[in-house]
């Protein structure tokens, strides 16, 4: 492992049994950039990757995104756990009916819905497994925003990318999506 300071960040480079370079920034350590590199790659080559304009933009955007995510409530550990439990329970009550409704409307079926403690995205969809994951922190938002994320993730089963066809699906089936996306961006 190699660790050094770069642009007010700590960079940790670890050689692993991987095919590609993986960049990670964790919400709890937004100024630590972790790189997993193939064992055959030199540390110097990995360091040069950080200077690529697209990587610099990704790091800057990701750090901004992390810094704008909902902050865990301050206080005792029990209070934090109670807040997470509240969000999870709220989602567990809302999601089954929303998924049932929108699977029928869109004519798709997902295999599994999970609620995870993720802070970097509100939802994700695996096209391979047709599993959808929802962030527990979405429980802090309005019913409309939760419904938007459900529709958004299910729409990925019809169109993988965020392209014109994908947004036409959202426009057709959930016209409120733009205002919901703005609310999520503002309060995230």
Image: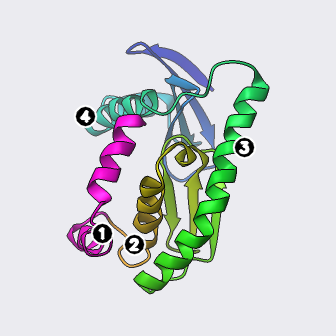
Residue contact at pointers 4 and 3, CB within 8 angstroms: no
Question: Dot 2: few (<14), some (14–19), or many (≥20) neighbours within 10 Å?
Answer: many
Magenta residues, start to end = 162-188
Q: CA distance from mark 3 to mark 1?
A: 30 Å
Closer to the camera in the image, 11 or 157: 157
Q: State the residue at coordinates (39%, 44%).
A: 184
Residue assigned mark 2:
155
Residue assigned mark 3:
85
Q: Is residue 180 left or right of residue 97?
A: left
Q: State the residue at coordinates (70%, 30%).
A: 80
Q: Earlier in the sequence, mark 4 or mark 3?
A: 4
Q: Is residue 68 left or right of residue 94?
A: left
Direction right: furthest residue: 78
Up-down relation of residue 90 to residue 47 (above or below)? below
Q: CA distance from mark 4 to mark 2?
A: 32 Å
Q: Earlier in the sequence, mark 4 or mark 2?
A: 4
Q: State the residue at coordinates (74%, 34%).
A: 81
Q: Earlier in the sequence, mark 2 or mark 3?
A: 3
Closer to the camera in the image, 27 or 78: 78
Residue contact at pointers 2 and 1, CB within 8 angstroms: yes
Res 151 → quadrant: bottom left
Residue assigned mark 1:
170
Q: How far from the left and from the top, in percent, is residue 56?
A: 31, 31
Up-down relation of residue 78 to residue 91 (above or below)? above
Task: Nearest to the eye among marks 4 and 3: give it.
Answer: 3
Q: How far from the left and from the top, in percent, is residue 74?
A: 63, 19
Q: CA distance from mark 4 to mark 1?
A: 32 Å
Q: Earlier in the sequence, mark 4 or mark 1?
A: 4
Residue assigned mark 4:
53
């Amino acid at each position: 492992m190699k660790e050094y300071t770069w642009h007010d960040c700590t960079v940790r480079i670890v050689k692993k049994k991987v095919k590609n370079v993986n960049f990670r920034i964790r919400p709890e350590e937004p100024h630590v950039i972790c790189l997993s590199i193939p064992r055959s790659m030199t540390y110097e080559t990995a360091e040069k990757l950080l200077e690529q304009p697209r990587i610099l933009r990704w790091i800057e955007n990701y750090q901004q995104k992390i810094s704008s995510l909902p902050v865990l409530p301050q206080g005792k550990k029990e209070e934090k756990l109670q807040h997470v439990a509240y969000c999870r329970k709220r989602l567990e009550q809302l999601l089954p009916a929303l998924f049932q409704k929108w699977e029928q409307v869109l004519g798709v079926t997902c295999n599994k819905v999970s609620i995870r403690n993720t802070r970097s995205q509100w939802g994700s969809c695996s096209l391979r497994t047709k599993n959808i994951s929802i962030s527990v922190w979405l429980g802090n938002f309005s019913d409309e925003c939760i419904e938007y994320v459900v529709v958004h993730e299910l729409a990925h089963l019809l169109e993988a990318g965020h392209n014109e066809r994908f947004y036409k699906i959202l426009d057709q089936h959930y016209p409120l999506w733009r205002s919901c996306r703005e609310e999520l961006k503002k309060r995230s």
